[in-house]
Amino acid sequence: MQSFSKLTILFAGLSLQLLTSGCFETKEEFTLNPDGSGKVVHECTFQAVNLNLGDNENQDPGLALTNAVRELLEKTQGVEAWRNVTFKTLDDGRLNFRGTAYFTNLSKLDIPNQTMLDFDWAKAADGTALLTLRTNKAGESDGLTLRPTRKAKAPAKDLSPEELTKQIKLQRGQFQQSKPMLAGFLGTMKHSVVWHLPGKISRSSNFTPDAAGNLAITFDGAKLMTVMEKLVNDDEWCRKHRGTGFDNIQEKPVMDAEINQYIFGENAPVSATVTAAKPLFNYAAEVAGAKIEYAQTQKALRVGSSATAEAAPIIQATPAKGGLKSVQVVGVRLVTESDEKRGLRPFNWDAGYTVSLLAEFPGAAQSVTDKTTLGVAQADDGTSLLPDSEWDRKVHFPALAKDKTAAILEFKLNLPGHNVQGLKELSGNVQYRVSRGTKEMDLGLEELKAGATGTNLDAQVKSLKEGWQKDGSQDLSLHLKISPDDLKSLSLVVDGHKTELRQNGYGGGNGSYNFNYESKTAFPPNGRLVAEVYDQVQTFDAPFKLENISLLGTRLEPRK
């Protein structure tokens, strides 16, 4: 499991994804063969969220269901065929999907937005095989990104006791700001996995065995939230680890086993060593039948029919002058009283008033920047609801629509007075960036080794180390003079073969960042690194103003 610092920032970034895909409850039952092939009965209940809120009234529930299932099948990676696919809308509006997926390599299986526990299977020279939890979920196909809450002013190891005390206090405040958002989706997130393994289990950790020799493990989001709350307020733990973990995201995880103890029960990796035996089922025979059935499912759901259009949004539709088509309030959260000591916190939030705005762009936007701010939040009694802190006036974790033509922007305001009926004015500025294409750029590294420098983007290999799982993978720390928003991907090219690398986070500022990447195999010295960067990027500042709206965001007649 990842370190607490990684977990904290990972789930902050994860909220972006969950705003558009909804939280999930997943159950999986794996049957694995010695070569790493297998099948999994995957069942998930989740909430699909439509950001095109104006269309919700006329949206066909059946169409929403099939669209969600089609997207799941299209985005899943490492699956050769699906079988016994069923789906339905539950009485509470959530969607339920169930199906059996066949895969040739467990380590390449990825069902995005519905799993928190991904696994690797590696065979050893002595005939055994090792099942391990795949860490650093961010940076895989889910598109999640580790983002620091703020840039560290000094390495934690250089802090004096007094400075450390100050830093811990500051980081605790940052956690309190993020906690309501984290609790909002972690509270219902669950993922349970059962394993049928091909052989005798000689040892395992953090799995629960049953009488038949199967292994089980469960991730509980509410439990994780409790652990985070406990550790971030534990003086001894924070001092031992030089802080709560909100700054240090550039180093690889060092607390995996310790965090596993809190989440799964043992101070050890999540792993199982298996003396491989005969296959548990005939993969070739079953997948042949599954392919025939899956072809019918693909045809019925039109799987793949919209892949090209979704993969390449029409960015050139954005006019050069920028601006906004519209801004409206689409959600509010009002908590008048909250008592944390007694555990009485409505919606698990502190007292305050939060508005959620839907900003429609005149085309597709690449990103919304952190310079998107509120300038005025005046109640109808003349008082200002604008937060005192500049940090609170900025947008955090804006969520772009799939077609990138709209975004959800949330702002936390001060609590309005008892006599306030609405807002006289809510205004600010949305800054967004637009790209009209991408281009590839060879970093110009003569050799892939620590200390090597390149000819483009001020590239420098900071370190090249063995992966922490010691399975032949390698971790690369690369310095680049480019904003993360301008870097679409980084690929390794060897003998003409191109492989996109998985990003495991970044840190830095002022246009200069260190990016962390992982390769399943060792980086060959003669390999080349090629960056795909956004081209012809423009930044637009678009002011907005809403006047005379109720606390719910509806039109309100001004007070006389």
Image (tube, grey):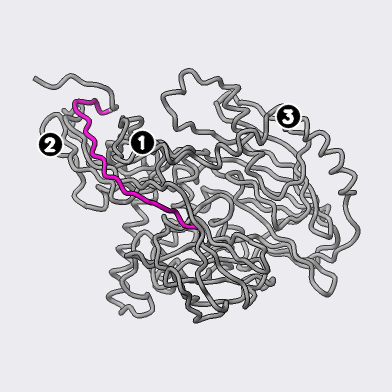
Mark 3 residue type: Lys
Q: Nearer the viewer, residue 235 or 379?
A: 379
Query: At which x and y percent is residue 20?
Result: 49, 38
The residue labelled by disc 2 is 383
Is 92 part of what is drawn in magenta? no
- For mark 3, what is the residue? 299
Which residue in the structure is indicated by mark 1? 361
Callout 1 amino acid: Phe
Closer mark to the observer between disc 2 and disc 1:
1
Left or right: residue 180 versus residue 425 is right
Q: How many marks?
A: 3
- Decide if residue 250 is on the left or right side of residue 494: left
Q: Quadrant of residue 522?
A: bottom right
Identity of the residue furthest to the left in this view: 560
Residue 234 makes an appearance in the image = no
Quarter placement of the N terminus: bottom right
Sequence-earlier tag: 2 or 3: 3
Q: In the rendering, at what x and y percent does residue 505 appear? A: 48, 62
Residue 553 in the image, given as x and y percentages of width and height: 28, 27
State the CA–CA distance, disc 3 to disc 1.
34 Å
The part of the image, by quadrant, that contains residue 158 is bottom left
Among the two numbered marks 2 and 1 on one chain, the one whose residue lies closer to the N terminus: 1
What span is in magenta? 532-551
